Image (cartoon, coloured by chain):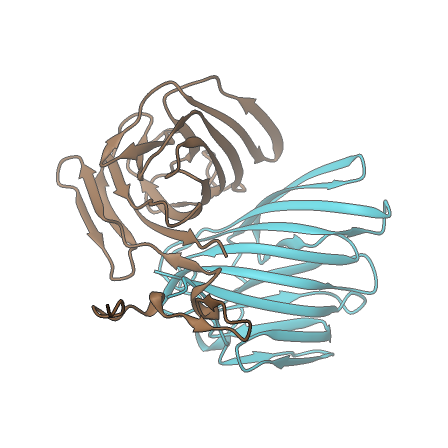
Amino acid sequence: MNQFTGRWNPTQIYDKRLDAAWVQPYAAVGSMVPIVPSATQGSGTGNTVTVSTNGTVTFSSTTRITVTAFTTSYDAYMVVMRISGSVAGASAQRLQLSNNGTPDSSSNYITQKMSLHSTRTIARTAASGYFELAPVPITPLVMDQTIHIYSPAFFRTTIMRANGVAPNAIANSSPRVWDSVGYYGVAADFNGISIYNSDNSSFNGRISIYGLEAT
Amino acid sequence: MSGLHLISPTSVNIPFSGSVSVSANGGISCTSTRRIDIRNVFSANYDNYMIVMSGYSPRDYSMTWGLIGANDILDVNAVYAYSGTQFEGTGNYDDDDWGATSFHEIGVSDVIQIIGYIYSPLLAEPTMARFFMNGYSGWVAGAGIMDGAAQYKENTIHNGIYFQGTEANPFTGTIRIYGLVK
């Protein structure tokens, strides 16, 4: 039987090494792969959600954005996002893991956060129904974060680490260093994330998700 | 397709002492450079970038950095801001500034390794950055940590970046800038 008929896929090309092992070529092994979400959902009046060819999700006027992008093809993911809000005040952004578009709001999340602005503040949040991200500024100010999520698609506990930068609530002052670690303490598997604000206000932004290939 | 692309700048400029070379793939190598302007390294193919730097200076390390705008002109508007924390030995130093004409110094004493993210410098939106710095501290003869957050407040388009030391503290090492596919 010919096992090689079908569509050509550049990620499925294998080279034969001198030791006769078949491996993927260098460009396709151990790299960071942009993920095109299998589904996105936006909530809120007049919200818009678009997805670029390579998978970046751009949204506006949304009170919740849910992106389905995780599979067992990757252990770890890197999520890069820019968010800009609509309501004055220190609205905190929250992340929930999701399955097929349904956010998990169980009390299995624990967040350890470090927020630094002039004087360092450290706080620990108790178990809650979300992973806490950085405060959301008002347009045109923006908040950026890079979040590493480890093994969300496998039936394990899930660890998340967010490294963010956000303007301080006080105008004309230095930005916040925002670092937080999230722990979902029960074995479960998820295929997406869902983002919303603590006051359910609307926000705009972009999210790109990358899978980190295991060699 | 890889989501992380090493970018080759259209040109680099060292207005003071030192030397620099750029590899075919875009890796930048500096020798005793007091300032390096990395021009047209941001492109419309990417919103966000990762920078990896490693190197050393002959004395305690200190280098500011900033953005380059149109016509390869350094942006020195007083709208840069920074917050950061530094750990060396048992010492901890928090620092911040606002309204500066460049971002705060980066580096931990003599030997440094930096990974940083720069968010949307080419868009007419604020530019934000996070830097994670590791190094050898001559002060305590041990390892040092320095983490910082940077904010350029105005909605200004930037297509390059520069790093500036001092005459006594030039930079020798490598700089790699990667685009995150969007």
Circle count? 0
| Colour of chain B in the rendered structure image | cyan
Q: Residue furthest front?
A: A1
Horizontal and vertical percent position of residue A166:
46, 41
Residue at left 70%, top 78%? B16
Horizontal and vertical percent position of residue A72:
36, 45
Q: Quadrant of residue B86?
A: top right
Q: Residue furthest left?
A: A46
Residue B69 showing in the rendered view: no
Residue A215 showing in the rendered view: yes
For residue B164, side relative to residue B129 (left or right): right
Front-lying residue, A186 or B147? A186
Residue at left 63%, top 31%? A119
Front-lying residue, B133 or A165? B133
Residue at left 53%, top 37%? A179
For residue B9, side relative to residue A56 (left or right): right
Residue B90, compared with residue B177, is above or below; it is above
For residue B92, side relative to residue A113 (left or right): right
Horizontal and vertical percent position of residue B60:
81, 56
Quadrant of the rendering where the N terminus of chain A is positioned: bottom left
Front-lying residue, B89 or B122? B89
| Colour of chain A in the rendered structure image | brown
Residue A135, compared with residue A76, is above or below; it is above
Residue A146, compared with residue B10, is above or below; it is above
Horizontal and vertical percent position of residue A137:
38, 38
